[in-house]
Amino acid sequence: MGNTIELNKRLILIADDEKEICDLFVNISSAKLQGCKIDMAVNGLEAVHSFEDGHHAVIVMDLHMPVMDGFAAFRKIQSLCSEKNIEMPCVIFFTGFMPSKELQAILDASPQHTLLKKPIGIQKVVEEIKARLHI
């Protein structure tokens, strides 16, 4: 197997079906995450395609979205990373519900991923992104 494809350490993906949340996050966090580019996806399938194109270092992903939910998108991204030898991004999940046992097991096993409960303040999300980007 060849070298692992590295992630773009200044590229962040926000995946949420509520466009207003994405827009708000981009507007507020652009100043707080200087030098970073933020892409948006409105469902899990778009998030997967966007990751394939950009290799985002951090993905902020709602668990409950149409077309493909956030957990299915995570699994697909995990599979793509394995198949194509791409470094796995850090994923910050958010939801207003209890996580599934499967997701909780992933969170417990891998501190690079985390779960934030809604409602979430933008500052908390920015802090979690900064911690994962080491900025």
Image (spheres, rainbow, N blue to C red):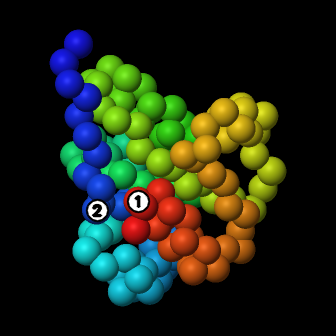
Mark toward the viewer: 1 or 2:
1
Is 115 positioned to the left or the right of 61 in the image?
Answer: right
Q: Amino acid at mark 1?
A: Leu
Residue at figure coordinates x 50%, y 39% from the top left:
74
Report if residue 14 is visible in the image: no
Q: Amino acid at mark 2?
A: Arg
Pointer 2 local density, CA inside 10 Å: few below 14, some 14–19, many at least 20: some
Residue 34 lies, in percent from the top left, at: 31, 79
Under circle 1, the secondary element is: helix
Q: In the figure, residue 96 lies in which quadrant?
A: bottom right
Residue 110 lies, in percent from the top left, at: 61, 37
Pointer 1 local density, CA inside 10 Å: few below 14, some 14–19, many at least 20: some
- Contact, mark 1 vs mark 2 (Cβ under 8 Å): yes
Q: Is residue 92 above or below residue 113?
A: below
Residue 16 lies, in percent from the top left, at: 50, 62
| Disc number for residue 15 | none
Sequence-earlier tag: 1 or 2: 2
Q: Is residue 22 above or below residue 77?
A: below
Which residue is identified by label 1?
133
Q: Quadrant of the N terminus?
A: top left
Q: How many marks?
A: 2
Residue at figure coordinates x 41%, y 83% from the top left:
32
Which residue is identified by label 2?
10
Q: Residue furthest top?
A: 1
Under circle 2, the secondary element is: strand
